[in-house]
Image (cartoon, helix red, strand yellow):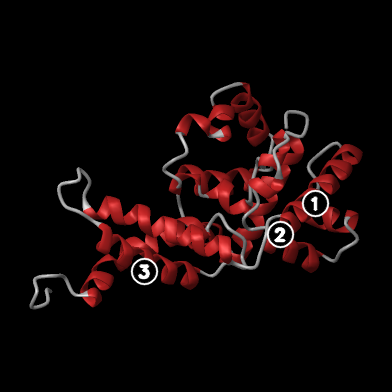
Amino acid sequence: MYTARGTIEKSHLLESHLPMVRRIALQMVARLPASVQLDDLVQAGMVGLLDAWGRFQEGGGASFETFASQRVRGAMVDELRTSDWGSRSLRQAGRRVEQAIQAVGHRLGRHPTESEIAHELKMSLAQYQSVLQEMQGSQLVYADDWGEDDAENTFVDQNTRGARAERAAGDDPMAQLLSGEFREHLAAAITGLPERDQLVLSLYYEQELNLREIGAVLEVSQSRVCQLHSQAIVRLRAALQDVL
C-alpha cells in the first residue's frame, strides 16, 4: 500500500516484514541469557526496519530484504548493548559449575549427575537448575579464554559478530579454532558426553530445532531444554579445559 506521494505506508511495511524481524530476533535470543526478552528485540528490530526503509536506495546491488536484515540485526545489537546486563556474572556462574563438574568427575571417574553437581556447589537441585536457566546464553569459548580484555569483548559482541559488517570472517576466532586441531578435540568431547546431552546439541546445532521443538522431542518443557543445553555446554568446557 502506498501513500499519495507514491511511498509505502509504514504500517504496511512493518506488517509485511514482521516475520523477518521475528526470525532474526528468535535466532539471537536463543543464544542470549534468559533475561533478554524476545519482544524487546522485536521492537528494536522494527525501529531498524524503518531506518532501513529510509536509507535504502534501489540499484545498489542488494535487495531491500538483504539490506533491511542487516539494519534490523544491527538495531537489535544496539539495544542489547544499552541494556543493563553483562556477561561477567554469567561467566563466573558458568565457571563455578564447570569447576564442580571437573571436581566430581575426577572423583567418580564419570560424568556427574545434576544432583551430584548441585551437592558439590552446596545447592539444592532446584537452585542448580535455576542457575542453568540463567546461563541460557553460555558459550563454549569466551574471548578472555585467549587473553583478550573483557571490557572490549562483551557477550553481545561475541554473539553478534555477524551483524558487524566491518569484521572480516577470517578474523573470527571461532572460525579459526574450528578449522584446526580444536575441532578434533571438540568432536571427541561431544562423543564423550552423556547421551541426552549429545541429543540436545545435535537437535539444536545440527537439526536447527528451536527450544520448543526440542522440548517436544524430549517431552520436557522449553525451560528444561534451556537447562540441559547450558549444562551440556559447561560439560564441554570442563572436558576441553586443557585445550582452552
- Element carrying mark 3: helix
Q: Is the Cβ of the residue at disc 1 closer than 8 Å to that at disc 2?
A: yes
Q: In the rendering, which numbered label is found on residue 132?
A: 2
For the point 26% across and 73% down, the residue is 15
Crowd class of label 2 (few under 14; some 14 to 19; many from 20; radius 10 Å): many
- Element carrying mark 2: helix
Marks 2/3: CA distance? Answer: 31 Å
Q: Position of residue 101 (x, y in %)?
A: 82, 46
Q: Earlier in the sequence, mark 1 or mark 3?
A: 3
Quadrant in which residue 2 is drawn: bottom left
Please tell me which residue lies in front, 25 or 116. 25
The residue identified by callout 3 is 46
Amino acid type at circle 1 is: Val
Q: Is the Cβ of the residue at disc 2 closer than 8 Å to that at disc 3?
A: no
Please tell me which residue lies in front, 168 or 240. 168
Q: In the rendering, which numbered label is found on residue 197?
A: none
Crowd class of label 3 (few under 14; some 14 to 19; many from 20; radius 10 Å): many
Please tell me which residue lies in front, 87 or 180. 87
Picture quarter with the N terminus = bottom left
For the point 62% across and 55% down, the residue is 137
Quadrant in which residue 21 is drawn: bottom left
- Element carrying mark 1: helix
Q: Position of residue 31 (x, y in %)?
A: 55, 54
Q: Does 243 appear above or below 13?
A: above
Q: Position of residue 105 (x, y in %)?
A: 84, 41
| Left or right relative to 121: residue 148 | left
